Image: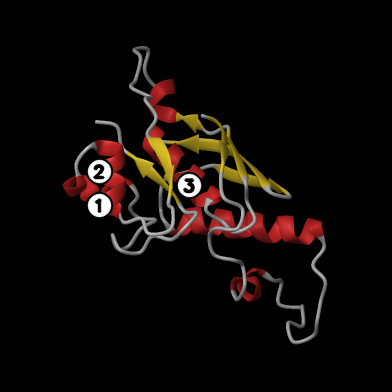
Amino acid sequence: MGLFSFVREAGGALGSKVYDLTHGDEDLNKPVTITPERMNELRKANIERSVAELNLGADPFSADVDGEKVVLTGSVPSQEVSEKVTLVAGNQNGISQVDCQLQVAEAAATDSPVSTESAQFYTVKAGDTLSQIAKETLGQANYYMKIFEANKPMLSDPDKIYVGQSLRIPQE
């Protein structure tokens, strides 16, 4: 799919998730400096866990983190899943670039060309609603549910979007 840019400060910070990602032998009550290598490990684990929890069907799948950049490799069943995995990785706090090298199985499984037309991505700005985004990108405000459906299961509610978040805008 290629290289995508994201808002580094957007997305949920690791915060309390760090506890779940540690090895159990780390004392989280004492101040600690997290090395860049350890932060890469934590972000990698968080991205891979988030993708697995969403049950998108990305298997085998790997996220290799180097600072603010993630390289995604593995296999996904469709272009849609590839885009969703890219968004999950890019919408993590501290990530500014995603290099999506995922192989789309449906394209590889057929000899005939499969529609791999990518959805466009939209970065949420202050004051945006899905209706406003739908009007701007799809021409009609009442198409907001198309955007919501295109971003399931990452979005649980049409009103729960945040500034800096990247969303899939489906192509008609």
Residue for point 71% across, 71% down: 23
- As drawn, the label of residue 155 is none
How does the figure colour the protein chain or chains?
A: secondary structure
Q: Dot 3 surroundings within 10 Å: few (below 14), some, or many (20 or more)?
A: many
In the picture, residue 54 is in which quadrant?
A: bottom left
Tell me the SS state at disc 1.
helix
Q: Which of marks 2 and 3 is nearer the N terminus?
A: 3
Residue for point 55% across, 43% down: 61
Q: Residue furthest front?
A: 127
58 vs 37, left or right, is: left
Residue for point 61% across, 67% down: 14
Q: Where is residue 142 in the image (x, y as percent from the top left)?
A: 17, 48
- Between 46 and 163, the one lying in front of the other is 163
Q: Earlier in the sequence, mark 1 or mark 3?
A: 3
Q: Where is residue 40 in the image (x, y as percent from the top left)?
A: 72, 55
Kind of residue at badge 2: Lys
Q: Position of residue 157 (x, y in %)?
A: 29, 63
Q: Are marks 2 and 1 in contact (CB under 8 Å)?
A: yes
Kind of residue at badge 1: Ser
Q: Label 2, on which residue?
A: 135
Front of the two marks 2 and 3: 2
98 vs 107, left or right, is: right
Tell me the SS state at disc 3.
helix
Q: Label 3, on which residue?
A: 87
Q: Label 1, on which residue?
A: 131
Kind of residue at badge 3: Leu
Q: Dot 1 surroundings within 10 Å: few (below 14), some, or many (20 or more)?
A: many
Q: Which residue lies furthest to the left in this view?
A: 142
> How far separated are the C-alphas under marks 2 and 3?
22 Å
Q: Are marks 2 and 3 in contact (CB under 8 Å)?
A: no
Q: Position of residue 107 (x, y in %)?
A: 40, 23
